[in-house]
């Protein structure tokens, strides 16, 4: 487990072979830099590790919507943990079938539950834990969590092309391995190196991680402007996407799902417009094209 976030005294960890994202979701907390998704390196139904230290204070089963084009669990589960690092706060977790109960003491890395395929997901969403840091007086709402701060504002290499080896392929998406040692896909914000985070362009907005986060400016990749900064946080900013699109072998994509990689070996998820529409093979080298309208 690697320390990835330290906010209001609480330390949050991610499996070293996993990944994480602050902005790669349409859920309200992610737009406010108050939500974090941690993707352990497991399939749906795999055991996920606890990202914090503390005591389980609530386990509540909640109804989940039906999956949109996929079979989903008929429920989700909300888990609240009183944080050992700061007992005046709680950690809220979603998207697990828990193996813990109220009163259990959990430590970072302990198995906490099996990953669920929630009806809140899109058909290309991978197994993950949704996390928020909350006041114990307001632990459950979709809004109102504390802002989260990336512990290591590591710069990512700014690359001249988005290309790599296809290392995973299924009907919903493909993963390509970038030839770079970086936290994620590098970009430029107001002339400074940064790291992209989000579902682009299909969410209509994105995040960029940068040490001195601006409140305005332009995000660029491949020397092309793709988004306009609208809000700054600590070590990150949010930007509204311009009109742009990616294509592969002449076919348009829905977009790229971008996350952060603690092992500094980033993969990029390619999401097609429809299932089985990528027309590539595992082991193939591919290059994406970017068009800004």
Image (tube, rainbow, N blue to C red):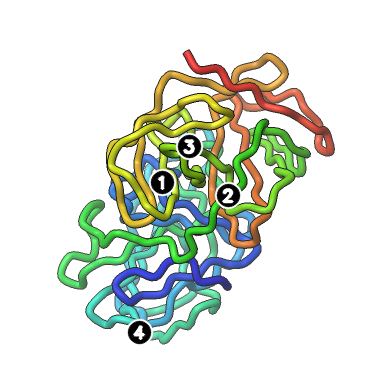
Query: Counting residues from the N terminus, which is met first, the one under dot 2 or under dot 3?
Result: 2
Residue at (23%, 52%) from the top-left corner?
143
Which residue in the structure is indicated by mark 1? 23
Residue 126: where, in percent of width, then height?
A: 56, 47
Frontmost of labels 2 and 3 is 2
- The span from disc 2 to disc 4 (Cα, nearest Å) is 32 Å
In space, the residues marked 1 and 3 are separated at their CA atoms by 8 Å
Q: Which mark is residue 156?
A: 2
Seen at 38% across and 55% down, the residue is 235
Where residue 288 appears, as percent x and y from the top left, is 67, 26
State how many labels appear: 4
Q: Residue at x 39, y 28 (%)?
A: 241
Q: Circle 4 sits on which residue? A: 84
Q: Give how far across and how far down residue 272 sits, in percent.
A: 60, 26
Tell me the number on the disc at residue 89.
Answer: none
Q: Are marks 2 and 3 in contact (CB under 8 Å)?
A: no
| Depth order, front residue of 64/184 | 184
Q: Categorize mark 3 by other alpha carbons within 10 Å: few (<14), some (14-19), many (20+).
A: many
Q: Which residue is mark 3?
A: 199
Q: CA distance from mark 2 to mark 1?
A: 17 Å
Residue 217 to residue 195: above or below:
above
Crowdedness of circle 1 by 10 Å Cα count: few (<14), some, many (20+)?
A: many
- Local secondary structure at mark 2: loop
Q: CA distance from mark 4 to mark 3?
A: 33 Å
Label 4: few (<14), some (14–19) or many (≥20) C-alpha neighbours in 10 Å: some
Residue furthest to the front in view is 191
**Of the image marks 2 and 4, the number of the one nearer the N terminus:** 4
Q: Is residue 140 left or right of residue 74?
A: left
Is there CB contact under 8 Å for labels 2 and 4?
Answer: no
């Amino acid at each position: 487990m690697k320390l990835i976030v330290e906010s209001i005294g609480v330390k949050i960890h991610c499996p070293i072979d996993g990944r994480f994202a602050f902005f790669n979701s349409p859920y309200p907390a992610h737009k406010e830099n108050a939500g974090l998704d941690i993707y352990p390196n497991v399939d749906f139904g795999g055991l996920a590790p606890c990202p914090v230290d503390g005591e389980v204070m609530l386990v509540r089963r909640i109804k989940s919507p039906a999956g949109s084009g996929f079979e989903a669990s008929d429920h989700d589960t909300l888990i609240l943990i009183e944080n050992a690092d700061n007992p005046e706060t709680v950690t809220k977790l979603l998207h697990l079938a828990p193996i813990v109960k109220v009163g259990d003491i959990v430590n970072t890395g302990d198995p906490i539950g099996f990953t669920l395929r929630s009806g809140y997901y899109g058909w290309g969403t991978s197994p993950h834990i949704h996390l928020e840091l909350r006041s114990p007086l307001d632990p459950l709402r979709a809004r109102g969590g504390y802002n989260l701060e990336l512990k290591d504002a590591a710069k990512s290499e700014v690359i001249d092309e988005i290309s790599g080896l296809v290392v995973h392929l299924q009907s919903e998406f493909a993963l390509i391995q970038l030839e770079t040692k970086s936290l994620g896909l590098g970009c430029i914000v107001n002339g400074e190196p940064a790291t992209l985070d989000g579902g682009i362009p299909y969410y209509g907005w994105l995040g960029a991680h940068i040490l001195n986060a601006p409140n305005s400016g332009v995000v660029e990749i491949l020397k092309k402007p793709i988004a306009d900064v609208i809000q700054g946080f600590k070590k990150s900013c949010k930007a509204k996407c311009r009109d742009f699109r990616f294509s592969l072998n002449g076919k348009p994509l829905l977009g790229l799902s971008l996350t952060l990689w603690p092992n500094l070996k980033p993969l990029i998820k390619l999401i097609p417009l429809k299932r089985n529409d990528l027309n590539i093979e595992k082991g193939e080298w591919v290059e994406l094209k970017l068009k800004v309208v």
